[in-house]
Image: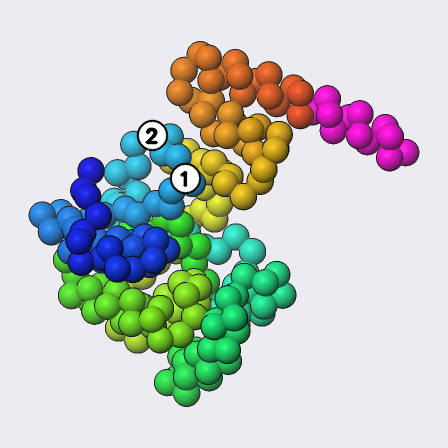
Amino acid sequence: MLPISKSLKHLPPNLINRHYKIFPHLYLPKSDWSIYIDGNIRILGDFSDLIEQVKCKGAAMACPRHPWRYNIFDEAEACLRINKFSEKDKRLIDQQLADYRAAGMPDNLPLSGNYVIIRAHRDYRVQEAMQLWWDHLQRYTQRDQISLPYVIWKKEVPFCLLSWEVPLHNRHFTIISHRRPGLLGVFNYLKARRFDGRFWRLSALAAGRISKASYSISKRFRK
């Protein structure tokens, strides 16, 4: 485990995380490839075959497809609708989209879910794109799903989408939800740890039965 670099300690925690997310070539200089995963994603087993999948497609970078939206314009609209933008982001988003269109970026570039990023991070095109990505997070909104398609297109990075969309639906990863408080959050946590041994497997099984029973009871009362 690497300590947080002293050069980053002036940044807020969210940007420190983004710096490690965006610049693996600075922190893993001896490695050719890296896989970034968000902190709420749990590894279920060996995922080295994912790198082979990306290599076979001739790509230097890959992410899952976004599970709900198709392009950055859909994403910007959704962020406004569900209040995911900061006040600063709200002031910048129209200019960001206008600048991307003025640069000639196609409207139909696919939107990725950046909770998993596979990179050949020694590739110069990847490194240039990551620097531009960081620059755009400073210049425009900090929703990185919006800026990544542009920088990949701009720097001509060989890119592919992984064949799955949501980590819950594949054999490599699962999600531990950190946005759902109360019993639902506990149930999700136990479900995510069901592969960690007999205690956790039985706990997850019991939680699933309680959740199912609670749903049945609430359904009866709604009738």
Q: Position of residue 193 (x, y in %)?
A: 45, 25
Q: Nearer the viewer, residue 95 or 115?
A: 95
At 21% from the left and 69% from the top, the residue drawn is 128
Left or right: residue 148 compared with residue 54: right
Q: Nearer the viewer, residue 206 or 111?
A: 206
Q: Is residue 71 above or below residue 25?
A: below
- For label 2, count other residues whose C-alpha is less than 10 Å away and answer few (under 14), some (14-19) or many (20+): few
The picture quadrant where one finds residue 49 is top left
Disc 1 residue type (three-letter): Ile
Q: Mark on residue 189?
A: none
Which residue is labeled 1 in the image?
41
Query: Is any part of residue 18 visible from this angle?
Result: no
Q: Nearer the viewer, mark 2 or mark 1?
A: 1
Q: Mark on residue 45?
A: 2
Q: Nearer the viewer, residue 53 or 96?
A: 96
What are the residue bounds of the magenta stretch?
212-223
Q: Label 2 vs label 1: CA separation?
A: 12 Å
Left or right: residue 203 compared with residue 154: right
Residues tagged 2 and 1 counted as in contact (Cβ below 8 A)? no
Callout 1 secondary element: strand
